[in-house]
Image (spheres, helix red, strand yellow):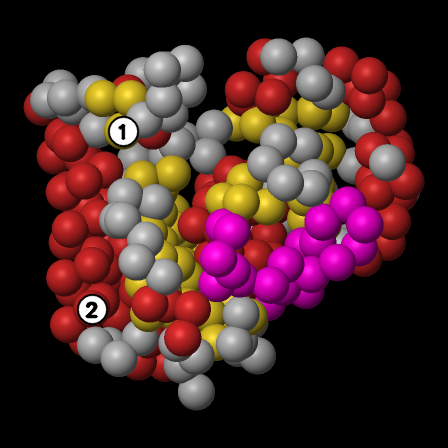
């Protein structure tokens, strides 16, 4: 049902990834900051990749809405049934440090539900993708969420910044292992593929950070919900999701939710 859109999103993600790698290898990043705290860096690579994605996907699907981290939000999208939700560079801090934990994240939503999701890490050439009711894949191979049932046997992947701020210190002993990685989109792809049993974040996230990953996790047989068990409805006027988010299988979700609540 969404084959054309998925194909276009995969092409777009790969080409945007080439733009990112061009700047990574040239050391030309021209870093600016969205806030005085320096917590939200943006680079020339973010902006060029965003312009490409907007032009390409907007040209292919001119009647769809658009929401991107690097594009000024006009709110026209709120009147659209279908909306592309995009982060041209998720993991900017890792990109600046040349850590291979950044990616392009592209999602298509219909009536607020993710129906196409693509996450591409150009450093590792890992492409996670899914479309509604068609399963989830990593570089052409179908992926499934972990089937681990006991939280003490489960590995969890969390935000590098959250981990460095000691936000997970009180929970370390509840899991078999805890790993900190940059880019929430990349972490969601890794958890959807079963490489880690759980992905969780306790810090607020914007829709463009998580939408593609939500689609991929669902199609891999998992759930991605806020801590109170609610699915996330996308294309909202307020794009920030403030509640903690957990992505895993349904059995582990309840255990992690109870732990973090």
Judge left or right: residue 42 versus residue 234: left
Q: Residue 42: give its label.
A: 1
Q: Residue 225: give its label.
A: none
Chief SS of the magenta region: loop
Q: Residue 58: give its label.
A: 2
All told, the count of numbered labels is 2
Give residue 136's position: percent from left, percent from top. Answer: 53, 65
Q: Secondary structure at mark 2?
A: helix
Is residue 26 in the magenta section? no
Point out the stretch of residues depicted in magenta: 218-239
Judge left or right: residue 100 versus residue 116: left
- The residues tagged by marks 1 and 2 sit, at their Cα atoms, a distance apart of 22 Å
Give residue 239's position: percent from left, percent from top. Answer: 49, 50
Q: Look at the image and tell me whether residue 42 can be seen.
A: yes
Q: Is residue 167 above or below residue 118?
A: above
- Which quarter of the rendering shows the C terminus? top right
- Which quarter of the rendering shows the N terminus? bottom left
Tell me which label, 1 or 2, sits earlier in the chain.
Answer: 1
């Amino acid at each position: 049902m969404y084959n054309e859109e998925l194909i276009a999103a995969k092409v777009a993600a790969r080409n945007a990834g080439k733009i990112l790698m061009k700047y990574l290898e040239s050391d030309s990043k021209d870093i600016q900051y969205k806030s005085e705290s320096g917590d939200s860096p943006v680079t020339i690579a973010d902006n060029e990749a965003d312009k490409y994605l907007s032009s390409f996907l907007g040209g292919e699907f001119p009647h769809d809405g658009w929401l991107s981290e690097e594009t000024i939000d006009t709110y026209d999208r709120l009147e659209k049934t279908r909306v592309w939700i995009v982060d041209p560079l998720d993991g900017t801090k890792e990109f600046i440090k040349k850590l291979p934990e950044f990616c392009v994240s592209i999602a298509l939503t219909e009536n607020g539900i993710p129906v196409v999701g693509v996450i591409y890490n150009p450093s590792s050439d890992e492409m996670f993708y899914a479309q509604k009711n068609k399963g989830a894949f990593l570089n052409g191979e179908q992926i499934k969420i972990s089937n681990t049932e006991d939280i003490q046997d489960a590995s969890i992947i969390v935000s590098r910044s959250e981990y460095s701020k000691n936000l997970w210190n009180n929970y370390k002993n509840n899991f078999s292992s805890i790993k900190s990685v940059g880019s929430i989109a990349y972490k969601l792809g890794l958890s959807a593929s079963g490489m880690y049993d759980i992905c969780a974040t306790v810090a607020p996230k914007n829709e463009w950070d998580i939408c593609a990953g939500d689609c991929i996790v669902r199609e891999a047989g998992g759930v991605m919900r806020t801590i109170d068990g609610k699915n996330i409805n996308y294309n909202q006027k307020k794009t920030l999701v403030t509640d903690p988010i957990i992505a895993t299988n349904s059995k582990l979700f309840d255990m992690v939710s109870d732990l973090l609540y």
